[in-house]
Each structure stands twice: as structure tokens, then as C-alpha cells.
Image (cartoon, rainbow, N blue to C red):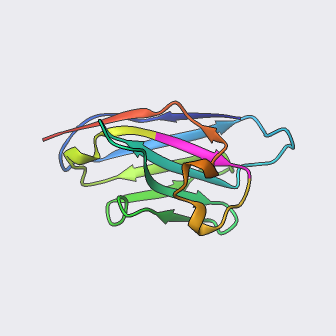
Amino acid sequence: VQLQASGGGLVQAGGSLRLSCAASGRTSSGSDMGVMAWFRQGPGKEREYVGVFRWSTNRPYYGDVAKGRFTISRGYGKNTVYLQMNGLKPEDTAVYYCAASARNPILSMFPDPGTYDYWGQGTLVTVSS
């Protein structure tokens, strides 16, 4: 399975960006993804959980950094998720990573990077003041 994140770029504070994450390939068992998540890592910071889309409940779940400004949605198949970011702030500057697992983890495991078996290469978002 390969994940491809795209859509990053330079935006002014208050602006918006939409990131995409597309999964290609199947697991060795032929399974689709159970969850696809977004994390970010800013300069000099630890990796931070943004949110996840879980296919079994067909809904997103958000970390604290995303609430109120970011929206996660799905594409038509079980292989694409989007991260719509509005009202961007300079502190949102980070490399944004998508991650996925074919399993269906419990909610408390969503923020743990170890939950996810597959990671994309990241896409850089820079928010200027």
C-alpha cells in the first residue's frame, strides 16, 4: 500500500487549503483501509494528531488542533480522504502526513502514530503572517 499526500503550499494567514491523500494498492490480505488519518509535524515540534476518517462508521474524528477549523472527508472509494483547512494560522505551518491502517482501531488509539501501518511522504503547508 502506498499513500500519496498532496495539496500543500504557501498561503496567507486566514486562508484555506485542501489536502488530499490517496491510497493505492492492497494489503497482503487484500483488505481495504479501515482508517485514514492526518498528522502534522511543525518545525521543532513533535508529530501531532489532526484527525481520522473511519470507514466502518463513515465519519471523521478530530484531534484538538482540528476542531472548528479543519474538516476531514472521504472520496468515493475507500482509498481517498481530504483535509479541508480554513482560517489557517502561522502555527499551522507543518508537514502534513497521511497515515492508514487496514484494521479498525478503537477511538482511543486514533492519536497514536503506532496505530497506523502505512504512511505517506508528507506535504508541506506554510502559512505566512
Left or right: 58 as drawn, with respect to 86: right
- What residue is at 19 percent from the left and 50 percent from the top? 14
Queried whether the magenta region covers residue 117, the answer comes back as no
- What residue is at 37 percent from the left and 59 percent from the top? 66
| Residue 20 x %, y % | 49, 41
- Vertical comparison of 26 with 115: above or below: above
Region rendered in magenta: 97-102
Q: Main secondary structure of the magenta part?
A: strand
- Vertical comparison of 105 with 79: above or below: below
> Looking at the rendering, which quadrant does residue 96 occupy?
top left
- Vertical comparison of 27 with 115: above or below: above
Image quadrant in which the C terminus is located: top left
- Vertical comparison of 7 with 60: above or below: above
| Residue 76 x %, y % | 64, 51
> Looking at the rendering, which quadrant does residue 86 occupy?
bottom left
Number of numbered discs: 0
| Residue 94 x %, y % | 33, 39
* In-front residue for pair 32/103: 103
> Looking at the rendering, which quadrant does residue 23 occupy?
top right
Left or right: 124 as drawn, with respect to 72: left
Going by the picture, which residue comes out furthest to the left?
129
Image quadrant in which the N terminus is located: top right
Going by the picture, which residue comes out furthest to the right?
29
- What residue is at 25 percent from the left and 50 percent from the top? 88
- What residue is at 57 percent from the left and 58 percent from the top? 53
| Residue 50 x %, y % | 43, 54
Left or right: 89 as drawn, with respect to 7: left
